[in-house]
Image (cartoon, rainbow, N blue to C red):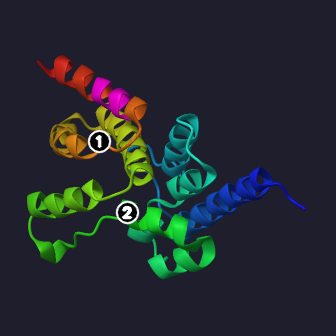
Amino acid sequence: MYKREELMNGLVRRAKIFATRAHASIGQKRKYDGQDYIVHPEAVALIVATAGGRPEAVAAAWLHDVVEDTPVTQAEINARFGPDIGALVEMLTDVSRPEDGNREMRKALDRAHSARASAEGQTIKLADLLDNARSIIRHDQDFAVTFLREMRLLMPLLTKGDRGIHDTLDTVLSAWERSRS
């Protein structure tokens, strides 16, 4: 008989392998440095694990961009990983589409969706934003202005998420803002 912890570690491993294959299947790379895209979900999963996230949340962190960025469907995530992880991935998947209007309108729809996420979903979202903010600040100061303004609008809606990650993200944003003034 396996212990729950051993089964969950297997769950995280399965999510890592699945996400790695899904992103690699379309040759997805990181925009700024050309690394395999999976380095981003890996960083998000590490932040969530470090914050004490349960294995299901760490697995969802590995999978958080799969539905949004690859041919994998939400139904496939639900079937392969169950309704708990499926629900987390759904909370993390942007709901806006290009036909919903300009960027400002689309981001408003996505913010409303993120605001409804559970505490775990918001924790993963904060980890995602933190890793993206670090990358964008490092590599694209021009886009950082837009991206970080959008994050400032989103952060007050993510109050159920991990406070430590929230505070770290706020520190990163504040340091960048001070450096620009």
49 w.r.t. 22: above or below: above
Q: Position of residue 33 (x, y in %)?
A: 43, 43
Q: Residue at x 45, y 76 (%)?
A: 74
Q: Residue at x 60, y 70 (%)?
A: 81
For disc 2, the neighbor class at 10 Å (few under 14, some 14 to 19, many from 20) is many
The residue closer to the viewer here, 91 or 140, is: 91
Q: Which residues are magenta?
A: 166-171
Q: Quadrant of residue 179?
A: top left
Is 69 on the left or on the right of 107, as rendered?
right
Amino acid type at image mark 2: Met
Q: Indicate whether residue 141 is drawn in magenta.
A: no
Q: Could you tell me which quadrant the N terminus lies in?
A: bottom right
Which disc, if any, is residue 124? none
Q: Position of residue 138 (x, y in %)?
A: 34, 31
The residue closer to the viewer here, 117 or 32, is: 117
* Residue placed under numbered mark 2 in the picture: 91
Q: Residue at x 46, y 55 (%)?
A: 29
Q: Position of residue 71 (x, y in %)?
A: 46, 77
64 w.r.t. 170: above or below: below
Is 2 on the left or on the right of 103, as rendered?
right
Q: Let me know if residue 73 appears in the view.
A: no
* Residue placed under numbered mark 1 in the picture: 159
Q: Quadrant of residue 146?
A: top left
- Number of numbered discs on residues: 2
Q: Could you tell me which quadrant the C terminus lies in?
A: top left
